[in-house]
Amino acid sequence: MRMSITDQPIDTVALRQRLFHRSAGALVAFEGWIRDHNEGRTVTALEYEVYKPLAVSEGESIIATVCEDIDVIDVLAVHREGYLDIGGCAVWVGVVSAHRDEAFRACRRIIDEIKVRLPIWKKEHYVEGDSGWVNCERCASHAHDHHHSHSHG
Amino acid sequence: MKTLTVRYFALFRDRARRDQEQIRTEATSALSLFAELEHRHGTEDPRGHCKVAINDVMVDWDAPVNDGDTVLLFPPVAGG
């Protein structure tokens, strides 16, 4: 399995080692971190909810498609679930290829697809003590305000 | 009339105040089921921002629902 979900801190060193290949000339890795602000509010922590069966199968499908299109050697992707503090690593995507261009392109495509396709939700906890689901309460809201123009992901 | 299991996630679970429920319905598609359950999830039209799966397979909103199906209602995702 190249896509996984974990409730433990992501061990990026171990993942990097798992991607070692003698024919690889490039590793491109993306780490998504928990930042302390979003849309003007101070964030103290994030909580990820994941529907694992489909998160894994959608992730595997994304990786398989990208590997068909781009000449890479191997891919690993991990997403966290549960409660994360500021600075925590929420998602890691690593791609190895013979040359850097393929690894950059594949890594970018995989993380972009992960963000819009996997059934994963995050609840932000704010410094004021309240919390809210991201992306977004106003979008999945009651009928009166469903006409909007912002994008997702 | 068919019996379906409906599961709610994240924002939808909070609004519905339940993880899942069994319902009896005449709904023929995922979209018509979603509309019937608006009093639970509070969303008028899911197309374009919400997703749906039937029996652990992602489907389009016009997919048919059949007796015994488990329908998963996903509010806008926010991974990464």
Image (tube, coloured by chain):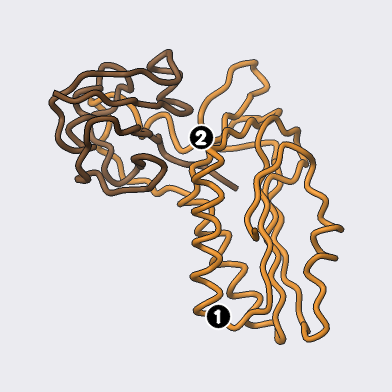
Chain colours: A orange, B brown
User: What x and y, as percent, mark residue A4?
Assistant: 65, 50
On the same chain: label 2 and label 1? yes
User: Which residue corresponds to the image point at 53% horizontal and 47% vertical from the top-left?
Assistant: A55
Does the rendering let one see residue B50? no
SS under mark 1: loop
User: What x and y, as percent, mark residue A32?
Assistant: 68, 51
Image depth: mark 2 or mark 1 in front:
1
Tag 2 residue: A134
| Residue in the foreground of this view, choosing between A24 and B67 | B67
Tag 1 residue: A70
Q: Which quadrant of the view contains residue A22?
A: bottom right
Image height of A60 relative to A139, above or below: below
Image height of B58 relative to A137, above or below: below
SS under mark 2: loop
Give the residue type at disc 1. Ile
Give the residue type at disc 2. Val
